[in-house]
Image (cartoon, rainbow, N blue to C red):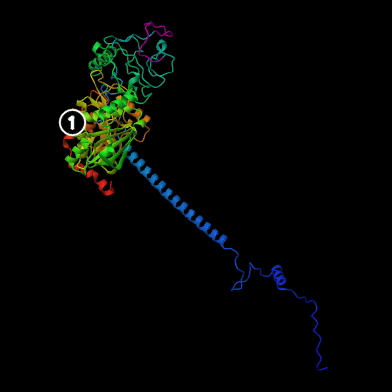
Amino acid sequence: AGNSVAPPRPQPPGFQRQDSSQSARSVGTSGSYSREQTPDRFGGPKRADTAPLQQKAVDEERRRREAEDSRRQAESERRRNEEEYERRRRQEQEDREYNDSLPKTRTPLAKQEIGGYGGESRDVSPSPNNQRYQAQRPAPPAPTQSKSGQPGSTMPIRNLQASRPAPSPPGQNGAKSSPQKQPSGTSPHGQQSRQPPANGQSQQHPLTRKPSGAGFSSQQGPPGSSQQQQVKPLNVQTKQPTGAPAKDAAIKQAEAMLTKKPEPSEKPQKEARMSSMTDAQVMDRLRSVVSLSNPLESYNKQKKIGQGASGSVYVARIRENAPSTMAQNLTRQYGPRAQVAIKQMDLRSQPRKELIVNEIIVMKESRHDNIVNFLDAFLQEETFELWVVMEFMEGGALTDIIDNNASISEDQIATICYETCKGLMHLHAQNIIHRDIKSDNVLLSSRGAVKITDFGFCAKLTEQRSKRATMVGTPYWMAPEVVKQKEYGSKVDIWSLGIMAIEMIESEPPYLNEEPLKALYLIATNGTPRLKKPEKLSKELKAFLSVCLCVDVKSRATAEELGRHEFLQHGCSLPSLSELLRFRQKGGH
């Protein structure tokens, strides 16, 4: 009917009503977007977390930077290797050109202008007619040859090294021929070994030869060069070399000195050496020569300027109202801004404390314009520290000057050597040997003053002990007699001064590229070192070096003789040496 109510509409088939929670779960499990992956404004899924991507980018950037750094280091290393290779190539080329310019037959070292050996003259020609050795008595005749049946003396041959008789001269056959294959008069080492003929007697056997001696074989040419020499006929008188009587006298004198017994007054007397002192004795001796007050009350350390094996060196200023009498005197003389150098040493680390005592005593007694003056010394027993106050040398060590100047002129070398020589003259006049003269121990002031420092190795000569034999010093500057541990005197400082002159010429001492032990061996065997480019030096400088670097100590100049040498008379003025210190102004040293 029109006013009736229609029944409710039936539900569509298969449709079931779900609540909101079930709907949400169904969406999450049906592959649609979950809460964590709701779509963003642009229609795509949101990223859950960007941290891994950012870390990956950081790692890639780090690896890229590391690769770039490695590439730069490899490039820098490659450039360094190329530069080193080029430097070595140039050095080898220069050495090759210099060696090619040398004469093929070199002048013996003894005849070079740089110096010479202390032995006899070696001007004798290596000709077989020149006798190198003069016997003191006639040699016995040759022994009997058992195979030939010829009679002869049964006395032994003293100067013949070969164990079998040498062959007879060429062209002689029969009984005089010898079956030996070894060359005549040649030892297995290729050295000549011949018997000297008797003076004033005619030779009686064809095997008797003119002498040369194994010790002179190096002067006769390369080994084995005399194997083809023809045997000298018997009736030819051997020529005596010029100057043989002088050599005989020298040999006799040497023999007399070797066998001479010491006179009663020359017998060595026992001397109380400071090295035998105990630590307690050394400390007692130190207390007697130094002050026991606090050095910090008088001096204010400013900057460390050096480090050595025995301690550190500082530049310091004098404090106001300093209690030290020396500090007060320095203030009155040089003003309140006066500077001093302080050498600070830890006595516990000093293996030979007696050397420190020795250094202080020598410095206190040696006042000279060419010696760094001792000012004050303090012993702090609480910390076992010793402070030695000295005058401050603004220019620093000669080593720094050599390293920072491309070259040093000969007139500057002459002045530095002359000033050093004057300091040595003062020391030697007091019978003091420095024993460690080198560029490290020669200091310059800003005004060009040259002074010797570091007396840790010095020795005091006495009448009872006029020579020393201890090998001390720095290897490259040591004299041959020091290396060989022979007795030596003050002339070892002259040798070291000559080596220091070579330092200024060639920027380094000889054998500096060698290990110290090998350098000592070369000094002992080679004697006078060889200059790299002697042709660039004046004859006066070479003559100066030759009298400094003479192996024969008797021929080596004394400090007083050296001070009068012609080369040292043509040096520059002391203020001119300040030109060598310009590198300090440029570098802010």
SS assignment at label 1:
helix
In the rendered image, the residue lying farthest to the bottom is 2
Q: Which residue is mark 1?
A: 563
> Where is residue 521 drawn, in percent x and y?
36, 28
Q: Position of residue 128 (x, y in %)?
A: 31, 20
The spot of residue 548 in percent (x, y) is 24, 29
| Residue name at image x 18 percent, y 28 percent | 560
Q: Among all residues in the image, which is located at the extreme right?
A: 1
Residue 109 visible, this orientation: no
Quadrant showing the N terminus: bottom right
Looking at the rendering, which quadrant does residue 434 occupy?
Answer: top left
Q: Is residue 386 above or below residue 189?
A: below
Residue 290 is left or right of residue 49, and the answer is left
Quadrant of the rendered structure where residue 412 is? top left
Does the rendering let one see residue 196? Answer: yes
Is residue 154 on the magenta stretch? yes
